[in-house]
Structures are given as structure tokens and as C-alpha cells.
């Protein structure tokens, strides 16, 4: 097991469409272990394989709210087969866009078809935080980021900020501290 580096915006790999998984072998189990370790360490409640540079349709999730209680879930080749007409709004963040949070509106409930860690086909109907997290992570394996769901104005602003930070080789939050006001207005 190893903690892996998480790709950060504007890394181009984050826009790749991940490939379906066809073999359930030892390297896949090792990748799942790495993903959980990386996700818990971050800490985050969800992670897509592409966020650690592996363009595979694989996500890990743990939305357990109880301290010290782990509920690790693995979704292989997940696919949304039904979404509710009812929407809900949740303030999302992303490990690949650290320290940026914005409200996103998504279907409140989804039904997801997936293969579990043992290679068995499954279906799950989710609501609440799990529904939001599943949609956020399934977006990742399709090269979509949560900032694609916010206004263009806000998106352009955050993309610019991260591009600038990458260019200067600093973390985006540090860049903000160093340039407190000149880009306002
Ligand atoms: Ni994310």
C-alpha cells in the first residue's frame, strides 16, 4: 500500500475519459488499496483512479460520518442508470482543486450499476451525500470536474488561479496569500 500523489488542476490527465476495467487481478486490488490509503490521508470522502493518474473506471468512496467507523465502498465501471427529477444542492470540493468550494445542483437520487471489488455486478440506489459523491466521482472518470457545473465566471476565475499557481510552482492557496488584491475587480 502506498499514498499516491493526487493530480491537481490544471493537470490535463484530469480531462481524460477513463477506460473500463476488464480484469480483476492483483494489480487492481493493489490500486484499490492505494486509493483508499490516499483518500483517507487527504482526507476525502471519494476518489477516482484518474486523480492518482490511472485512467481506469474505478472509484472509492467512504461517506461514513461516525468517527472511527470506516465504510469503504468500491465502484468498478460505475454507470448512472437512473436519476431523480428532484434536485439537491450541496457545497462541493475536490481533492484535485484544493481549498475551493462551491454549491453544485445535481439530481437528489441516483441508481448506479457497477461491479464490486469481487467482480460481481451490483446496483445501488443512493441519496444524500452518497448520491452527490457518486455523481462527482463518476464525472471524474468521464473527464468532468465539479467546476464544470458552476457559472463560467466562477470557473474561469478558479482555472486561472490554479494555472497561475502551477506556472509559479506554488500551491494555489499560497499564490492567493502572495497576491492579496490586485486581481480583484
Ligand atoms: Ni473531485
Image: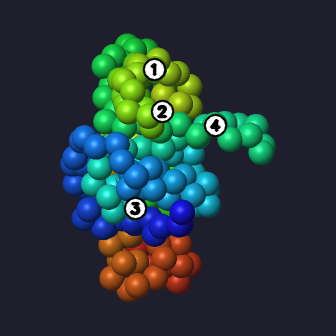
Does residue 150 appear in the picture of this structure?
A: no
Give neighbour class at mark 4: few <14, some 14-19, many 20+ (Cα, 10 Å).
Answer: few
Q: Which mark is residue 71?
A: 4
Q: Residues at badges 4 and 3 in contact (C-beta under 8 Å)?
A: no
Please name the residue shown 62% across and 61% down the image.
41
- Quadrant where the N terminus is found in the figure: bottom right
Which type of secondary structure does the marked residue at label 1 adopt? strand
Pinpoint residue 52: horizontal percent, then vertical percent: 40, 61
Give neighbour class at mark 1: few <14, some 14-19, many 20+ (Cα, 10 Å).
Answer: few
Q: CA distance from mark 4 to mark 1?
A: 15 Å
**Vertical order, 134 against 21 (above or below):** above
**Residue found at the far right of this picture:** 67
Q: Which mark is residue 124?
A: 1
| For marks 3 and 2 on the same chain, the one whose residue lies earlier in the sequence | 3
Pinpoint residue 11: horizontal percent, then vertical percent: 30, 67
Q: Quadrant of residue 166?
A: bottom left
Q: Which residue is mark 3?
A: 52
| For marks 4 and 2 on the same chain, the one whose residue lies earlier in the sequence | 4
Pinpoint residue 38: horizontal percent, then vertical percent: 54, 60
State yes or no: Cβ of the residue under disc 3 lies below 8 Å from any atom of ligand 1: no
Q: CA distance from mark 4 to mark 2?
A: 16 Å
Q: CA distance from mark 1 to mark 2?
A: 13 Å
Q: Which mark is residue 132?
A: 2
Please name the residue shown 40% across and 66% down the image.
8
Does residue 172 appear in the picture of this structure?
A: yes
| For marks 4 and 1 on the same chain, the one whose residue lies earlier in the sequence | 4
Q: CA distance from mark 4 to mark 3?
A: 21 Å
| For marks 1 and 2 on the same chain, the one whose residue lies earlier in the sequence | 1
Amino acid at each position: 500500500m502506498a499514498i499516491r500523489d493526487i493530480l491537481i488542476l490544471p493537470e490535463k490527465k484530469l480531462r481524460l475519459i477513463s477506460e473500463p476495467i476488464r480484469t480483476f487481478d492483483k494489480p487492481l486490488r493493489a490500486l484499490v488499496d492505494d486509493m483508499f490509503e490516499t483518500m483517507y490521508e487527504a482526507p476525502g470522502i471519494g476518489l477516482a483512479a484518474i486523480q492518482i493518474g490511472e485512467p481506469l473506471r474505478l472509484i472509492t468512496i467512504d461517506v461514513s460520518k461516525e468517527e472511527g467507523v470506516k465504510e469503504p465502498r468500491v465502484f468498478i465501471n460505475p454507470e448512472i442508470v437512473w436519476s431523480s427529477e428532484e434536485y439537491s444542492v450541496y457545497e462541493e470540493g475536490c481533492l484535485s482543486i484544493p481549498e475551493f468550494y462551491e454549491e453544485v445542483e445535481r439530481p437528489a437520487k441516483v441508481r448506479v450499476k457497477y461491479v464490486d471489488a469481487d467482480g460481481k455486478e451490483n446496483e445501488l440506489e443512493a441519496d444524500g451525500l452518497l448520491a452527490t459523491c457518486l455523481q462527482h466521482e463518476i464525472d471524474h472518470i468521464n473527464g468532468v470536474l465539479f467546476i464544470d457545473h458552476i457559472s463560467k465566471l466562477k470557473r474561469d476565475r478558479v482555472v486561472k488561479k490554479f494555472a497561475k499557481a502551477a506556472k509559479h510552482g506554488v500551491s494555489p492557496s499560497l499564490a492567493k496569500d502572495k497576491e492579496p488584491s490586485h486581481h480583484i475587480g
